[in-house]
Amino acid sequence: MRTTTRRRRLAAALVAAAATATVSLASPVAAYADDESATSTSATSQEQYQTLDDVAQQYHPLGVYTADDGSLTMLALPADTPPADGDQLESKFPAGMNVLGYISQFTKDEEQQLEQEVTAKGWIADNTVDYSVGVSYDAKNDVVLVDTDAPESTPVLV
């Protein structure tokens, strides 16, 4: 019961803070990069992206972020990923592609549970009004984002 109350308060705080709130509970604990590719200046090919996608799916990542200019791709692994898996992942990155793999602060279950609790809208005191709520994982910043169209004046259950 105490955990449920704490999670409701967290969900309420996320939504009440602003139209877009950012949750950051800790810093990533490990990072892995393809040293050879860090100096590469050539454009990343579709084949390299496909190879990276194939590798990523083996580790069930929380998210993948690619810089607009394609210079860096970040791959966020769940917090419960064993460090040995991170080391193996590094060796599978496509040659010539600048990839940063890191272990997130969130497990997949934590991210999904937070998303379910926020989208259940239990934080709205007046549940007769419909507000849109979206929850997503941001791999670039290792945070969970909450977006809503509810006005800041909306009473929330805390």
Image: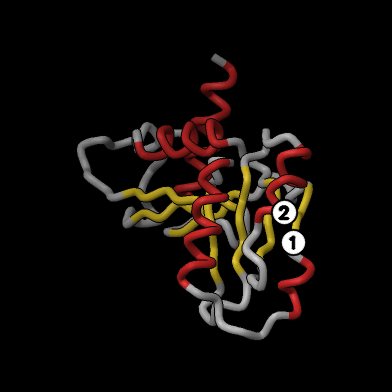
* Residue 90 image label: 2
Image spot of residue 83 (x, y percent): 77, 39
Q: Can residue 108 be seen by looking at this rendering?
A: yes
Q: CA distance from mark 1 to mark 2?
A: 6 Å
Circle 1: element type: strand
Foreground residue among 145 and 105: 105
The answer to whether residue 70 is left or right of residue 20 is right
How packed is label 1: few (under 14 Cα within 10 Å), some, or many (20 or more)?
A: many
Foreground residue among 146 and 139: 139
Residue in view at x 77 percent, y 71 percent: 36
Foreground residue among 45 and 84: 45
* Residue 19 image label: none
Residue in view at x 66 percent, y 67 percent: 95
How packed is label 2: few (under 14 Cα within 10 Å), some, or many (20 or more)?
A: some
Circle 2: element type: helix
The answer to whether residue 81 is left or right of residue 128 is right
